[in-house]
Amino acid sequence: MNRIPIAVLSLMLTFLAVPHGLAQQHGSINHHKAAEGKDPATSSYSGMEKRRVKALSGEQMADLLAGRGMGLALAAELNSYPGPSHVLELWDALGLTDEQAFRTKALLDQMKAETIPLGRLVIEKETELDR
């Protein structure tokens, strides 16, 4: 049975969730501004078209290139499922054994080996879209 790597699954979910969320946010922003009597033609995204990659901030690009992701684990972390980097940050507080820390570090390394190339791909594809 083929297993989908966690990083690939996360990226796939991102592409499914982000456009819907942005569409809802964008619609509610324009509706809210129109309700306040402000110009609905003024975009809250003004200025982003001048960025190196329009859809990504410099911080987002740095995070993708370092395998840190884009904060998509928030829901998991808010429900007591921290990612491996946060588990390692909290090593003492969690009372991890050396074996648990070693296995968590191995998981983090594996995750980064998958996410860094995916991050480069996201930046590459966003750059192509800009062109």
Image (tube, rainbow, N blue to C red):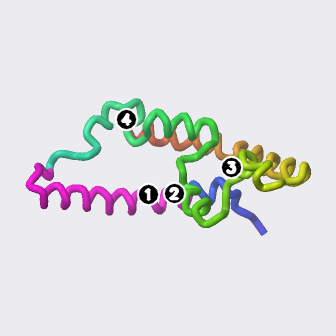
Labels 1 and 3: the sequence-earlier one:
1
Question: Can the viewer see residue 11 in this picture?
Answer: yes
* N-term mark: 4 or 2: 2
Nearer the viewer's eye, disc 4 or disc 2?
2
Kindly report the secondary structure that dominates the magenta region of the rendered protein: helix
Mark 3 touches mark 2? (CB < 8 Å): no
Provide the residue designation for mark 4: 131
Q: CA distance from mark 3 to mark 2?
A: 20 Å
Q: Residue 38: percent from the left, percent from the top?
A: 11, 51
Is residue 15 part of the magenta span, yes or no?
A: yes
Residue occupying the far left of the picture? 37
Q: Which residue is mark 3?
A: 86
Please tell me whether mark 4 or mark 1 is closer to you in this view: 1
In magenta, the rendered stretch is: 12-40
> Three-letter amino acid code at disc 1?
Val
Give amino acid for label 2. Answer: Thr
Q: Residue at x 58, y 56 (%)?
A: 73
Within 10 angstroms of label 1, few (less than 14), some, or many (20 or more) residues?
Answer: few
